[in-house]
Image: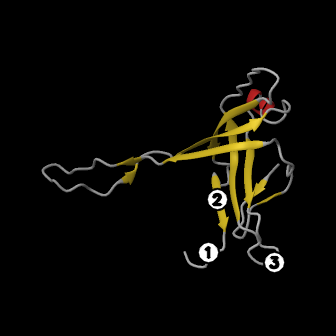
């Protein structure tokens, strides 16, 4: 499907059905900065500056149900959007619930490790990398809670 960035909440236009039973998600961002900027003859360090592109990676642990969940996208090297929505069980007020949404606008699966170890449920940890979707969007995180102050 497609994920649309918005200022109030993230939304999807298609592909809103759950792709699998997810039990764990990890997202890691590494920002590249030059932190050792000492001018000649000085003991004062200069302000750190960006000297490379940020790397956003992660993994999703999912129960393997079928090849369309992630394996086909990995095999075809297809870019796919990923969206995780976690909703709290108790309403804040009315129809508003605590919510955490994480959207990866253009992700690629880095591996598709399917290993069968017996008659149990097959769980796989699938690593991914986030890329710019061509519109300047990489990852968007939104959070709504009972907190009244920031």
Residue under pointer 2 = 141
Could you tell which of marks 2 and 3 lies nearer the N-terminus? Answer: 3
Q: Residue at x 73, y 39 (%)?
A: 79
Q: Residues within 10 Å of mark 2 (few under 14, many from 20)?
A: some
Tag 2 near tag 3, CB within 8 Å:
no
Q: Residue at x 73, y 47 (%)?
A: 82
Residue 86 shown left or right of residue 94 in the figure: left
Tag 1 near tag 3, CB within 8 Å:
no
Task: Residue 73 in the image: state x and y as whole percent.
Answer: 77, 33
**53 vs 69, nearest the viewer:** 69
Q: Residues within 10 Å of mark 1 (few under 14, many from 20)?
A: few
**136 vs 47, nearest the viewer:** 47
Image height check: is 90 above or below 108? below
Q: Secondary structure at mark 2?
A: strand
Task: Residue 24 in the image: state x and y as whole percent.
Answer: 68, 43
Q: Residues within 10 Å of mark 3 (few under 14, many from 20)?
A: few
Give the Cα separation between the discs numbered 1 and 3.
16 Å
Of marks 2 and 1, the one in the foreground: 1
Task: Residue 129 in the image: state x and y as whole percent.
Answer: 62, 39
Tag 2 near tag 1, CB within 8 Å:
no
Residue under pointer 3 = 94
**46 vs 64, nearest the viewer:** 64
Residue under pointer 1 = 147
């Amino acid at each position: 499907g497609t994920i649309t960035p918005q200022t109030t909440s993230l939304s999807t236009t298609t592909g809103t059905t759950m792709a699998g039973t997810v039990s764990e998600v990890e997202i890691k961002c590494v920002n590249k900065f030059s932190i050792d900027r000492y001018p000649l003859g000085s003991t004062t360090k200069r302000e750190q500056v960006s000297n490379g592109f940020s790397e956003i990676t992660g993994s999703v642990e999912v129960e393997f149900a079928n090849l369309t969940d992630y394996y086909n996208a990995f095999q075809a090297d297809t870019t796919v959007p990923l969206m995780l929505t976690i909703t709290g069980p108790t309403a804040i007020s009315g129809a508003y619930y605590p919510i955490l949404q994480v959207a990866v606008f253009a992700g690629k699966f880095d591996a598709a490790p399917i290993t069968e170890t017996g008659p149990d449920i097959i769980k796989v940890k699938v690593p991914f990398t986030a890329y710019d979707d061509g519109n300047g969007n990489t990852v968007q995180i939104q959070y709504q809670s009972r907190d009244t102050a920031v």
